Amino acid sequence: MTARTKAGADGGTPTGAGADGGTRTKARADGGTRTEAVPALDTDALIDDPDIRIIVCCGSGGVGKTTTAAALGVRAAERGRKVVVLTIDPARRLAQSMGIDSLDNVPRRVKGIEGEGAGELHAMMLDMKRTFDEIVEAHADAERARAILENPFYQSLSAGFAGTQEYMAMEKLGQLRAREEWDLIVVDTPPSRSALDFLDAPKRLGSFLDGRFIKLLMAPAKMGGRAGMKFLNVGMSMMTGTLGKLLGGQFLRDVQTFVAAMDTMFGGFRTRADATYKLLQAPGTAFLVVATPERDALREAAYFVERLAAEDMPLAGLVLNRVHGSEAARLSAEQALAAAESLGAENLENDGIVDQAAGKAGLREPADSPAAGHAPAPSEAEADRRPVTTEELTAGLLRLHAERMQMVAREQDTRDSFTALHPEVPVTAVAALPGDVHDLSGLRAVGDRLATGSAPAGAV
Amino acid sequence: MSRFQVVSGKGGTGKTTVAAALALALATEGRRTLIVEVEGRQGIAQLFGADSLPYEERRIAVAPGGGEVYALAIDAELALLDYLQMFYKLGGAGRALKKLGAIDFATTIAPGVRDVLLTGKACEAVRRKDRQNRFVYDYVIMDAPPTGRITRFLNVNDEVAGLARIGPIHNQAQAVMRVLKSPETAVHLVTLLEEMPVQETADGIAELRAAELPVGRVIVNMVRPQLLDGDALRTASGGRRKEIAKTLTRAGVTGSAALVRPLVEQAAEHAQRVALEREQRTVLAGLGLPGYELPLLGEGVDRAGLDELAAALREQGAGQGESGRGAGS
């Protein structure tokens, strides 16, 4: 029944990270079934380990994958490693924070990496079309390359059919690794529909390229139009006929030309896709599943954990972003609200005595005017006219604290349900920052929180 | 109000929840709505506490006032086989195509075909009429791909119409495009009051407009209450900590002296967040679009939460006939 009274037993409730730190003291009412400690994920040990050459950050959209990847990159570089961060589709200002606001598909040195014994940080943004074009140019002679690049089917395919981004991210990862210029590659995964896409990309492309259907499509073009058709049985010609009708004859011809032109490159695609897949399974790779303490994000995270296990991919742990804590945790939400209530009542009694203007000074109702579009909240100057009594102020602090404690409890419940499913997964909790990250110092702050989130109890 | 409501938004902003709440809100007063899911995540079923949705329209909820919400998870492969059946009466040959990998090819590899099938199926539901020549669904709500991909997803028909220059797919693509670019459609973007989602929303709107797709509303989700503002906080940090401690004690809080600092620091973070949210509201106001705001539900979203959000949408005018804040058209 003493569950979760220490940060260490809590799998890394953020400690010592300013006001967001603190320990969780809520004892569970459901008995001591989950008293064992959640293992802590030590991100510093991970990024310091010279045997770790690739860190893959995966997770559902909007959980801070790219920020996590960038923060790990900055921290690893400042701890002495030569790092490249491969981002797929970063928010503009995050990219700018690392000085990569151009989409040129080439790793750029990030300025401002500091500290004694600091290494280097490079960063790049994936340009999937450029990556695809480069593969074509590298593996086909000039004439054939031009034929492919000009093919309308290729142009549409390379600009983004479902899966191109995933495949090209894998391709680029393989290229970066092969260059042996960096001792650590940190990559964030594309904002896929689901976990499947990133892991499946190489296999899916492979099975597509090896597929009977592709061979079928290639046959007529290869053998020169009608002559090839003789080799097709009635069912097959009916099929290409049907597709021809459905998609239009020109479309099918474009596909056939494209497939024929790409023919010589297929083996290369397949081989590299398989090699990258094996690279991901190798001991030098570590997967970090990124989530926020919200039901959907953690459900997706649980799914990732299961998929990685099924594919023999090495999972290092779970990074839980935007976790809230409170240093005033011994005051419960209920106590805080009751105290605020009593102050409110007191305030009403004194209304005639204490000189105050509008009774709501400093306190606002939820979402002032929900339907009023997005008008900014009333200006601060307006509120300046009204003195705030200490009672009102204190009641406000208490309500705010109650809200915080409710959020902390909610997040803990969500985390507990994840832990119940996957008690073996090491976790680091990253305390929520009040604002967005725009620069290296912001990324450093996230890096600090990543590290302290896994600190054992009493380390602060 | 447009009959086809497309709900997109940055990942993590809760677009599936908003789409479901909108479907409920629009189904009041005996109306019938259809919510379609196109990404195979089964998020709708989870929200409504139902079993996984099949490729079949089925009733998933009853709205206040007797309205009905239907749901459909569109499966591209099955939709393609549907079309083949419709146009060519293929029957068993469809299965043969599937075996050869042709269906797989057409729905996952051939660029855009998948998206055409998904939007095509949704548009078919929008236009479908019963024997009395009334629309089967008053509104169709789509839980669409995220902001970063929405323009491409909706506009892919244009592209496919160019690639497949003749044939049923070409015609289908053109027909779908006519619905999507008409006032019958409104594309809503869900955002949070945070910098990245707001920036992505602004970019998404610019892309949609460039593609001549009708932009509906910006829906601000998970709005948290503002309990204390910066002024109150400045007062707090200036020399009143002792008074606050005394007041806490008077309110029955023990050991109040040690609590003042963390409480004031929490308030400082809150004030910082409120200031950032205010900036983001200003950015959103600059987009010049109508909006809805939905509160953060403390306990997470279940069926009761959906009803609460639907009620909030109705209060703000969703489903109140053609008058009020008619979006998009």
Image (tube, coloured by chain):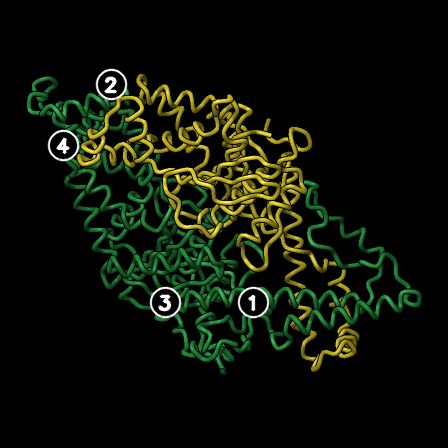
Image position of A385 (left or right of A36): right
Q: Answer with left or right where residue A376 lies relative to residue A230.
A: right
Instruction: Characterize the local packing of mark 3: few (<14), some (14-19) or many (20 or more) Cα atoms within 10 angstroms.
Output: some
Q: Which residue is mark 4?
A: A215
Residue under disc 3 on the same chain as residue under disc 4 = yes
Apparent colour of chain A:
green
Dot 3 or dot 1: first in sequence order is 1
Image location (x, y in percent) of residue A317? 36, 65
Choose top left, top right, bottom left or bottom right for residue A212: top left
Q: Which mark is residue A249?
A: 2
Of label 1 and label 2, which has the lower sequence position? Answer: 2
Q: Position of residue A431 (x, y in %)?
A: 52, 65
Q: Which mark is residue A422?
A: 3
> Disc 1 residue type?
Val
Q: On what subunit does the disc labeled 1 rest? A: A
Residue B255, visible in the rendered structure: yes
Q: Which chain is yellow?
A: B
Same chain, labels 1 and 2 = yes
Helix, strand, or loop for circle 4? helix
For the residues labelled 1 and 4, the Cα–Cα distance comes to 57 Å
Residue linked to disc 1: A408
Q: Are marks 2 and 4 on the same chain?
A: yes
Q: In the image, what residue type sits under mark 4?
A: Lys
Whether residue A98 can be seen here = no
Q: Earlier in the sequence, mark 1 or mark 4?
A: 4
**Image spot of residue B21 (x, y percent):** 56, 44
Mark 2: secondary structure? helix
CB under 8 Å between callouts 1 and 2?
no
Q: Which mark is residue B248?
A: none
